[in-house]
Amino acid sequence: MDKHNLSPASFIGVQGKDIISFGSGQPDLPPPKEVYKILPHYSDFKYGLIQGQENLRNALSKQYPHSTADSFVITNGASEALDLTLRVISSYDHHLPKKVLITKPYYYSYPHMIKFAGMEPVFVNTKNGRIDMDDLRVKIGGCRAIIINSPSNPTGRVEAVDSLKEIEKIAQAQGTYILSDEVYKDLIYVRENYLIEGPHVVTINSFSKTYAMCGFRVGYLWSLDSKLVNDVISIKTHTSMNTNILGQEMAYEATKVPRKFIDDQLIIWEERRNLLYNGLKEMGFDLWNPEGAFYMMPKVDNALDFVWDLYKNYSVISYLGDWFGSPGRVRFSYALDVEKIEMGLSKIEDYLQTKKGA
Amino acid sequence: MDKHNLSPASFIGVQGKDIISFGSGQPDLPPPKEVYKILPHYSDFKYGLIQGQENLRNALSKQYPHSTADSFVITNGASEALDLTLRVISSYDHHLPKKVLITKPYYYSYPHMIKFAGMEPVFVNTKNGRIDMDDLRVKIGGCRAIIINSPSNPTGRVEAVDSLKEIEKIAQAQGTYILSDEVYKDLIYVRENYLIEGPHVVTINSFSKTYAMCGFRVGYLWSLDSKLVNDVISIKTHTSMNTNILGQEMAYEATKVPRKFIDDQLIIWEERRNLLYNGLKEMGFDLWNPEGAFYMMPKVDNALDFVWDLYKNYSVISYLGDWFGSPGRVRFSYALDVEKIEMGLSKIEDYLQTKKGA
C-alpha cells in the first residue's frame, strides 16, 4: 500500500480481528432471514424481463405514488440505475448542455459515472454539509441534470425540505432531470423522507442499505417519465439484460418483511451514531451533526497523515475526504458494532495523545 | 403487435401451449442440478470483489492458458463484459479511429453496444455465413477493435481456423483489439473450439448457454492485457460493482460439473439441429449448414410476411433477418424439444402449401 496512492480500493480485502474499519459503506448486520427462505426450493433459470420481475415491480408500485409496475426498472444495484439513466440523458437532444450538477462533497462514484456517460460534472458548494442554495441558483441553469443524494454519503446530512421543493420547481421550469439517489432514505434520524417529485424526476433506490443485501446487487429506478423509463429498458436490453432473477425474488421477499425490521435497524444505527458522534466531539473534532445514512465527516488537520498513521500504527481504517471532493476532512462509517466503535475511538484518542506528545 | 414495428421484444412474454417458438435464444433444458445444491445453506450478503469471486476466477484460470485469477473479470452476463470492454477501448487515446468491425449478419446487440460506447460499427461482408477475408483485409485497417462471434448467433456458422489465425496476425501487427465472443464455444458440431490469442485479445464467455444459466447473468472476460483488465475493473467499480455473489457461487459449482454434462447436451442439440435442418431442406429452403450454437438462417422470400403470417395464423415464432442485418433471411432457434420442432415444421409446411394454393 502506498501512502500517496491511497483509494477506497486500497482497503478492499483488508481483514483481520485486529482491524477496526470505519471505512466500508455496507451494513454489517444480516438481511431479514425471510429473503433466504425461498432458496431451498428455487429452480428457475431462464431470462427474466429486462425491466424486472413483475411481482417485485408490483410490490414497489405500492410504495410510490401514482405508480404502476411500469414506472420501475430493476437494476444491478443503484449503481447501474444511475449509470443507465446518465447514459440515456446524455444521448438526448436537449436544450441544456451535457452537464450534471452534484454537491461537493459527493459520493465518490458520481464524477466518474458522469464522465463515463459523456457528460461533465459541475460542483455546487455546500454549507454545513447541505446544498448552498445561493450557489445552486447560479449554477443549475446550465445543467441538464442534477443528482441529489439525501441522506448523503459521505456527509451524513439530510437536505432541508425547502431546498428540495425549490429544486423541484427550478428543475421543472427549465426541463432539468433530477436524479434522486435515495438509497439511505430508510436511515433518517431527524424527519420522514421527503420524496422528490416531478415530470423528469428519476428516483434511485436499492435493497443494499435498508435490507443489507449489498452483495446481491438489486437496485431500481422509479420515474413517471415513461419515455426515459423505456429508453433505460432499451439500453439495458443490450448492456446487461435482466437483473439476476434469484436476487430479484429475494428482494421481493424483502418487500413483504414487516416495517418493524427497518424500525429495529434504525434504533441500532442511532445508538452507534450517538456513540461515535459524542466520542469524536469529546476529542474536540469539528463535525456536522449526522442526520442520516451511517457516515460522519469530521475536519482533520493533515488528513492524509491521519488516515495513514491510524491505519499503519493502530489498524484503524478511515476514508480520506479528498476521495469525496472534500480535502481537510475524513469519512467515518459506523457500520460496525458498538464494541468495535468503542475500541476504535480509544485508538484514535491514543493516536491524538501520541501526536500531541511528539 | 404491429407488423411494421416488430422486434425481438415484440415476442417477449408471448406464451401458451399452442405457441411454438423458434425465436428466443435460450436453452430450454435446465442447468446441472449441482448449481442449486448450495442454495439451502447460503447466508452471505456483503459486497464481493468487483473483479469477481476468487474461487470462480481460480477455477476459470485452469481452463485458459497462461492465466491466473487476475486474467478474469466476472460480469453481469457476456453483455456487460462486452459493454465495459467497448467503453474502456473507446476511452483510450489510440492511433486507430473509434470504429469497430463486425460481421453482417451480426448479433443484434452489437451495433447498439458499439454506438452506446461512443464508437461506430463498420460491417464486414460474409460469404456463406463466414467472414469474407477479402473484405476484412480492406476494412480492418481503420478499426480499433473487431468483434468475432464464432460460433455465430444468428448464422450458426463457425469461422475457418485459417481466417482466425490471419485475424490474430493482422490485429497484433496494427494494435487492434479482438473481442472474441465465445458464448457458444461448447456448442460446436464440426471441430474443437479455436481459442483466439494475442496481446490485445479479450475473450468473452458466460454460463448462460453451456450451463443454461441465462437468468442468473454470470458472464466473464478473459484477457492477458492486464491494463485493459484493470481499466474494466475501474469502470465496473462505479457502474455496477460486484456481480451478484450468489450467481457467482452457482457458476463456481458449474465449473466442477463433469464434462459429461456438456457432451450430453451436445448430443441433444445435434439431434434437434439435424431434425430442423433436414426438415427445412426438404421443404426447399436455401440455408447454410449449421455448425454451432443453436440457430439456422434460411433465405425466405418476403421475410416479413413469413414471420408475421406464421405467428398470426400458425402460432409459430421466428425472428426476422433484418434485426441481424440480414434482410431476406429468417432466424430459427432450435432451443425447443423434438416434438415441438416437428409440430413447427409441419405448420410451416401447411403455411407454404396454403401460400402456393393462393
Image (cartoon, coloured by chain):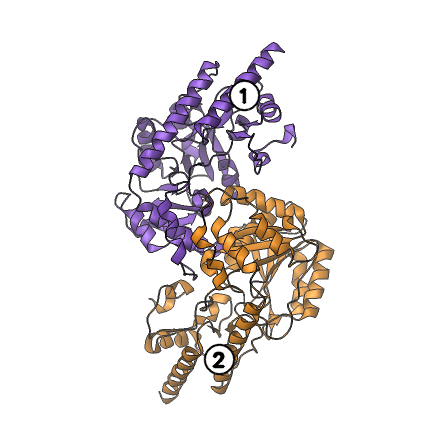
Chain colours: A orange, B purple
Determine whether B243 is above or below A192 in the image.
above
Specify whether residue B119 is in view.
no
Residue located farthest toward the top when viewing the structure as drawn: B357
Residue B46: percent from left, percent from top: 43, 62
Q: Is residue B309 above or below residue A218?
A: above
B307 and B108: which is toward the camera: B307
Q: Residue at x 56, y 78 (%)?
A: A288
Percent x, y of residue B279:
45, 18
Q: Is residue A254 visible?
A: yes
The residue at 37%/48% (across/down) is B35
Q: Secondary structure at mark 2?
A: helix
Q: Residue furthest bottom?
A: A357
Asked if residue A240 is positioned above or below residue B143 in the image, the reply reads below
Q: How many marks?
A: 2
Identified by mark 1, the residue type is: Lys
* Residue B310 image offset from top left, x and y in percent: 58, 23
Q: Measuring 28% from the left and 43% from the top, which residue is drawn there?
A: B63
Amino acid bearing label 2: Leu
**Residue tagged 1:** B347
Chain label for disc 1 = B
Residue A209: x and y in percent read 51, 64
Q: Quadrant of the C terminus of chain A?
A: bottom left
**Of labels 2 and 1, the one closer to you:** 1
Residue plotted at (65% across, 45% down) = A93
Quadrant for residue A179, please give it: bottom right
Per the image, the residue denoted by label 2 is A276
Secondary structure category for the residue under label 1 = helix
Mark 2 Cα-neighbour bin, 10 Å: few <14, some 14–19, many ≥20: many
Q: B145 and A348: which one is in front?
A: A348
Q: Do callouts 2 and 1 mark residues in contact (Cβ within 8 Å)?
A: no
Badge 1: residue crowd in 10 Å (few <14, some 14–19, many ≥20):
some
Q: Quadrant of the N terminus of chain A?
A: bottom left
